[in-house]
Amino acid sequence: MIAQHFPILQVVLPLLAAPVMVLLRSGRLAWALATAVSWAALGIALSLLAQVADGGVISYAIGSWPPPWGIEYRIDRVNAFVLVLVSLIAAVVIVYSRASVAAEVPEEQHYLFYTMYALCLAGLLGIAATGDGFNLFVFLEISALSTYVLIAMGRDRRALMASYQYLIMGTIGATFIVIGVGLLYLMTGTLNLADMALRLREVDEARPVLAALAFITVGVSLKLALFPLHLWLPNAYAYAPSAVTAFLAATATKVSVYVLLRFYYSVFGESAVFAALPMGRILLVLSLAAMFIASTVAVFQNDIKRMFAYSSVAQIGYITLGVSLDSTTGLTAGIVHLFNHALTKGALFLLLGGIALRLGGVRFDNIGGIARVMPVTSFGIVLGGLSLIGVPGTVGFVSKWYLVLAAFERGAWWLALLIVLSSLLAVIYVWRFVEAAYFREPGDAVAKFKEAPASMLVPAWFMVVGCIYFGLDTGLTVGGASQAAAELLGSGR
Amino acid sequence: MNAAGHFSYWITIFIAIAGLYIVVARGNLIKKLVGLSIFQTSVYLLYIAPGKLIGGTAPIIAQEFQIYSNPLPHVLILTAIVVGVATLALGLALVVRIKETYGSIEEDEILKQDESPSSEPH
């Protein structure tokens, strides 16, 4: 009975939990409620994925107003995949954040932290679940505004400017998206994404539709930190609280990639975007620029969180590279890297948070010899780094494998070579960490440390184990991704 | 439609570019937020102006009213205005915190303070 309301409960549970947390005012109760809601969201997402696994589409009319006049929540295999990813990351990070937030955020702000966490989760789940263009913008802004608050709660005073810059850039991006949706609404008369796709075929005036595509592309690229619109990401990830960095790095950009895919394939249609326009080539060039330039900049960073933030920009380049290849294999590669990179970066930032718990900041000049006092954490970071490089046996390898396959399918041998070369750049910055952690003598400050607490190590290692497990047994991830890719390509025109 | 018929779109574009220019060209944090608000306002006009039909009324179901102007954009823009207000409020709260921390709301002064070695994380 209640299962038929799962699409809306997915979003409403975290959304309602937020004001309850404000009323509770207790950090501990707020954390307990946030954990309950995150795990409930994970359960609902898994149930929705099971329901659509055989190819059905769940169409839920909010308030029983039938689409296309009412707002529709439309769950198919693509967004069920994204829903499971976001709620899984949220469920893992919330367990971790008990100890992490206690150390990094002042006690009287804890309940506000968890309120914003719940709102961010509700926003991200709403973006993935909705089938209405304007509803998408609203949830995008909900998740964005709560993200700005979460980032500003960082210990370092530079978190404030980082949050402000992200606010300016993120709002411009969201406004571009709403301009695009507005132009589509003017041309088709509907806001329902599925209905828009049908009506766009009958539109004779092509230029506003083209302008809408351009606005939506630029707006979403800002949100997913596609080079060169990535400038907000390094500061935001570096100075935010550790739990926030892990949560954002694993979810926010991935959901924005989903928005891009939804608009490109389900609304505009593959032929309009990739055949009639050079969108594939544009994305290809920008992805390659991201992969190489961001990896190179990462090599020279002193702050380790910043280094991995630039690495995120490069990895997002891999995802958009897969999308730009516009084939089933390419799209599968992009979607599977969405999942794999979320696991990898989530694990890395969670483990770095364990170091930051003891050290304050995580920079190369103060983590010398840390492997001696925190061996489990350091080994976890090494495994995550191997996944970034794409060593066989880790999830990173799976994504790179499918990317190279997609490149070979197109006959682009040079592209496969470039993918391998950029992975070599990742070796450099991962080696920097290994050298600093394992081969230096621990300083006086480091020698006094113990390992990170279990409540932080267990979630972080859960994700590291996930990196290895899904790198060896790829049935679930690649299966889900290829089904999602087939669904996207099949629904187009 | 001629250029004069596109009057509302010209205004939309002008306001949008003016807002974006202010965000980019001004270093004062509050002025940037004002520019952002102006940019968001242009979007409201983009939605509402095409909804009005010549000779259209509010959707009243009666014999003498045949042509209706579209009421849906108004609803959408109310939502967008609320989003804009929330963004502006959050931005201003951040500026208050930045002023308390750095003592300035000029972007280049703030960035210069963070470049100096005394800005190590505490």
Image: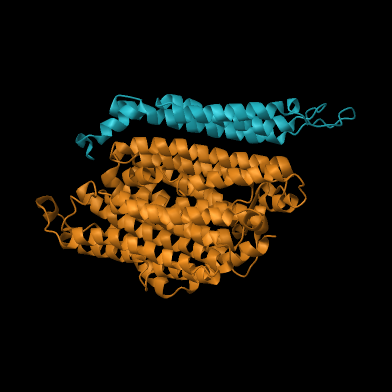
Chain colours: A orange, B cyan
The image position of residue B36, as x and y in percent, is 50, 30
Q: In this view, does A29 lie above or below B5?
A: below
> Residue at the spot x=51%, y=41% of the render?
A142
> Residue at the spot x=48%, y=27% of the render?
B22
Question: Which residue lies most toward the right here?
Answer: B63
Q: In which quarter of the image is the C terminus of chain A?
A: bottom right
The image position of residue A268, as x and y in percent, is 66, 53
On the picture, is A95 further left or further right than A322? left
Question: Which residue lies most toward the left here?
Answer: A444
Q: In this view, does B46 lie above or below A301?
A: above
On the picture, is A235 further left or further right than A132? left
Q: In which quarter of the image is the N terminus of chain A?
A: bottom right
Front residue (pair A210, B82): A210
The image position of residue B93, as x and y in percent, is 40, 29
On the picture, is B110 further left or further right than A72? left
Q: Count the numbered circles shown.
A: 0
Residue A29 visible in the displayed image: no
Residue A64 visible in the displayed image: yes
The image position of residue A296, as x and y in percent, is 34, 54
The quarter holding residue B68 reads top right
> Residue at the spot x=32%, y=43% of the render?
A239
